[in-house]
Amino acid sequence: MSAPACFPAMGCTVVVGGDDRDAAAARELFADWEQTFSRFVAGSELNRVNAAPTPAVRVSARFATAVAAALRAVEETGGLVDPTLHDALVTAGYDRDFDDLAPAAGAPGTPATGRPERVRLVGRLLLRPAGLRLDLNGVVKAMAVDAALAATGATFVAAGGDLAARTPIDVGLPGGDSVRLAGGGMATSGSVTRRWLRGGRAQHHLIAPRTGRPAETPWAQVTVAGGDCLAADVAAKAAFLLGEDGPGWLDALRMPGRFVAHDGAVVVSREWCRGAVPCT
Amino acid sequence: MQTPPPAESFLRKLSSTLHPPLKPLQQHACVNRTVAGPENRPLARARRRARRAKFAIVVGSGLTFAVATGLARSSYTSHPKRRATPLAAPASFVGVVRRNLLEAGAVAPPEAAPVTETSTS
């Protein structure tokens, strides 16, 4: 098997386990998706939708699919994974590409809470109050990973913490461990990588919808294995935001999950314990 | 018994020659036709009703048979009159299945060095 190909996209490094043709196809796909969904690409469809003054906006089929997935995530996670936290992210300081972020002395502004119940999708018609801005990063990167795997002959596609594999593969975990992904997707969410300072206080991108502020949880990182990358990513974010209730929530869903606390302690869900490693 | 006078027997013969005797009543074509006198009108009405009833029964049976045949031909699957369409799950069922976003994956102990890693995003 040839060495995996790598390229930058969506603020991370994308790794494609396949030949050059697979890598080229994946690269083009990620570029298309970034043009559609990035908050930091001028003229992206997301920015046009967010700037539209009317409550009803006709969107592309790809955009509608992402909104539909985001609304399903709201429903399945009880509102924890929320596509209406654009303003909360900007308030916390995430108002430009992460690589361009620099510590700022000013304190974060007044947080904006999520309002996913105000978003409706009818076919390709998006209905939301004018001025309610969306951020679909909670689902888009994972969906792009799944789409790239489906569109190519690659054995796996990984973008930052999000991974989808066609065959069982061995995956390195945060902290040095590894596990064999028997099928589907895997995602890791956490506050370790995307962190910045505002007013001397650490901020990160995982916003608690009810407070509009970066969530305060005991976890540094949460890794979940799902039926596909989207399922894994949504579950990882929700489990992170649930704090101490995260492992129990994954147990109820029978999803394998691995939680790394800020002090380095590792907690795993029941299904992870059954499948992966001897539990101590 | 008195013997008729010869003139009367002659007259009878003459009469039978001039006026052939009538056919017996049972040979006449119209003998079975009942004359519809005032005492036969209810019977005529009854017979008309019976004819109408028979007609209605025959026509109704024919129509019912035709409708039933049409329904059977349109719904009976062993002799399709339209192109067969592939079986597919109802859209509502597909929708329910697809709504289950959080489908579990599977992990196992590692068997080799990792080919990639999942880092925090």
Image: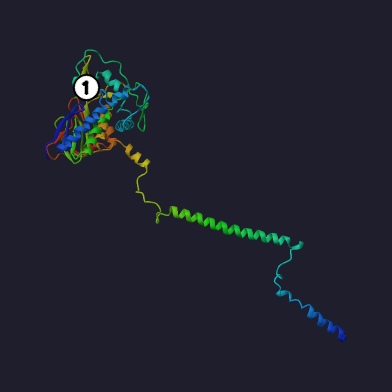
Left or right, residue A110 beside residue A161? right
Q: Is residue B37 above or below residue A243?
A: below
Judge whether B38 appears above or below A102 on screen: below
Residue A213, how many percent across, how many down? 28, 20
Q: Nearer the viewer, residue A102 or A216?
A: A102
The residue under label 1 is: A97
Give above or below for B78 relative to A182: below
Of residue B27 and residue A213, the one placed in the foreground of this image is B27
On the image, the x and y values in percent for residue A265 come to: 18, 28
Q: Is residue B37 shown left or right of residue B87?
A: right
Tell which of B108 and A96 is nearer to you. Answer: A96
Label 1 marks a residue whose chain is A
Rendered residue at 55%/58% (across/down): B61
Amino acid type of the residue that numbered disc 1 sits on in the rendered structure: Asp
* Residue A92, image quadrant: top left
Mark 1 lies on a secondary structure that is loop
Asked which quadrant contains residue A85, the reply is top left
Label tally: 1
